[in-house]
Image (cartoon, grey):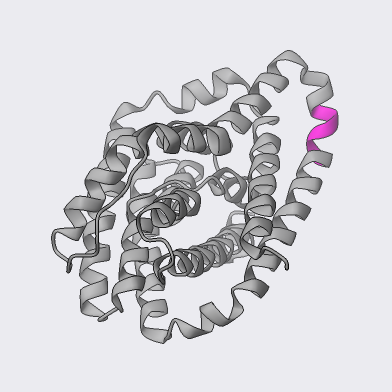
Amino acid sequence: MINTEFIIRVLSGSALFTLLLAAGLRLAPVEVWTALRDWRRLVMLLAVNFIVVPAITVLAVRLFAVPPALALAMVLLSVAPFAPVVPVFTRLAQGDLALAAGLTAVFPVFCTFLTPLAYRAAMFFLPPAGELKFQTLSILATLLATATAPLALGVALNQLFPETSRRVVRWAEIVSEGVGSLSLAFVVISEFRSIFAVGWMPVLAMILLNQLSLELGYRLGGPDRAAKMVTGLGTANRNIALSLLVAADSFPATAVVPGVVTNGLLLILLGLVHVAWWRFGPSRRQRN
């Protein structure tokens, strides 16, 4: 019997590692460090992602009467910002890749300590859902291994072997995008029934939350449009891997886990829509 969950984990993990490694191969350490020096922007991003976005998520699930399991899945996603796909989306949208890599690399550390606090604060305004089991060290290790490590490895390889990195980066991107497309297609096919079982009201709530989060994050990027893309994408695209880890530990064998997968998949699709709009939309054509 085919273990669908195992295949999803392998494909998703492989896709994330190769995609982030390829992004790192385009960057030098000084570029990442320079992009991260604006501490005021970082503080504002932390406040928006761990306070404002969870708050509007609670408001949305109450306003749209989202079923409890899906509401819990949405809350888990709301407290897990900056998905590892943000550097990939940023590169495709031609945004500030150094800033995207830097923020994606450091946010797992903040998530390890702020995610459980934000979750408990959000759930104070919703019906009891059970005890949150948050394995701090295990989750930190997983996040660093899946997001920070491949980015850092790519940056290090580019620093140590710049000529080789320039030669292989495009091939690495082709392979990583192929694996990513395969992973996304497999998830869509395997979760097809779950996606259509969600109902249109929760989907509408998630779409509105995603767009509002994008707008909030976009405004924190400063005057540079390339930086705005990063902060917008990072705020709109939540860390599905972190949410799944917490859901699987805290709410096993419930509808919360497929709810995270379904909503996470929707966020990825919406992220691709935003990338296409920025890359090929009217504003892009006007600048050209």
Q: Position of residue 179 (x, y in %)?
A: 75, 53
Residue 47 placement: quadrant: top left
Left/right of residue 66 with respect to residue 24 in the rendered view:
left
**The C terminus lies in quadrant:** bottom right
Between residue 154 and residue 3, name the one nearer to us.
3
Residue 184 visible to an observer of this rendering: yes
Between residue 31 and residue 59, name the one nearer to us.
59
Residue 112 placement: quadrant: top left
The residue drawn where x is 49% and y is 21% is: 33
The residue drawn where x is 66% and y is 40% is: 17
Residue 254, above or below 149: below
Residue 187, above or below 32: below
Q: Position of residue 34 (x, y in %)?
A: 48, 22
**The N terminus lies in quadrant:** bottom right
Q: Position of residue 274 (x, y in %)?
A: 53, 62
Magenta stretch, residue numbers: 166-170
Q: How many marks?
A: 0
Task: Label the magenta part by its dominant secondary structure.
Answer: helix
169 is within the stretch colored magenta: yes
Left/right of residue 215 with respect to residue 147 in the rendered view:
left
Residue 262, above or below 200: above
Q: Position of residue 280 (x, y in %)?
A: 64, 62
Which residue ends up furthest to the left in the rendered image?
124
